Amino acid sequence: MRRIAGLALIALLALPACDKPKPAATPAAQGTSLPASQTAFLAIPRTGAATDDFCTRFKTFDRFENWQGKVQDLRISTLDGTADLEINIGQGIRLEAIVQKSDPVYPSLLKLGLGQAIIVSGQFTHANNDADCLYYRGPFGVHLTGLKS
């Protein structure tokens, strides 16, 4: 009886280790390599003394093509249908696009689900000048010109 109880205890202790969910894959871990410009953007230092240089380097990024990410959040206004899409492009860094119903990417946006892998193209808005630089992980405002799932 003790032996059975001991084996049951071992089984119970081992069970949680088997049930742990795997962490969500970042875009780079999805099996395809990232575009060079996305890799360079993700490599900009965001901690320590190097963050002083972040704004200067961030402002060199204007357009981006075929960047890989995952839908982190998607909200659609019940008033006018405007969508607020937040995209995780890796390392917890987020892009945010406000998409009007008249925007060409809007129909593609309606088919998205949370956590879904997507490929985006567009440009940084740099709307707030240095204000964007205060938040090293974003969300960074963008205008999308392309959206693929």
Image: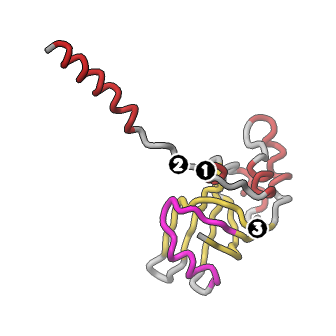
Which residue is labeled 1 in the image? 26
**CA–CA distance between discs 1 and 3?**
18 Å
Give residue 92's mark: none
Identify the image quadrant of the N terminus: top left
Which residue is labeled 3 in the image? 65
Image vertical order of residue 71 relative to residue 22, above or below = below
Q: Nearer the viewer, residue 85 or 105?
A: 105
Q: Nearer the viewer, residue 149 or 11?
A: 11
Write down the region rendered in magenta. Answer: 103-120
Query: Residue 63, percent across and down?
Result: 79, 67
**Crowdedness of circle 1 by 10 Å Cα count: few (<14), some, many (20+)?**
some
Which residue is labeled 2 in the image? 24
**Crowdedness of circle 2 by 10 Å Cα count: few (<14), some, many (20+)?**
few
Label 2 sits on a secondary structure element that is: loop
Mark 2 / mark 3, whichever is N-terminal: 2
**Crowdedness of circle 3 by 10 Å Cα count: few (<14), some, many (20+)?**
some
The amino acid type found where label 1 is placed reads Thr
Identify the image quadrant of the C terminus: bottom right
The picture quadrant where one finds residue 34 is bottom right
Label 3 sits on a secondary structure element that is: strand
Left or right placement of residue 36 versus residue 85 in this view: right
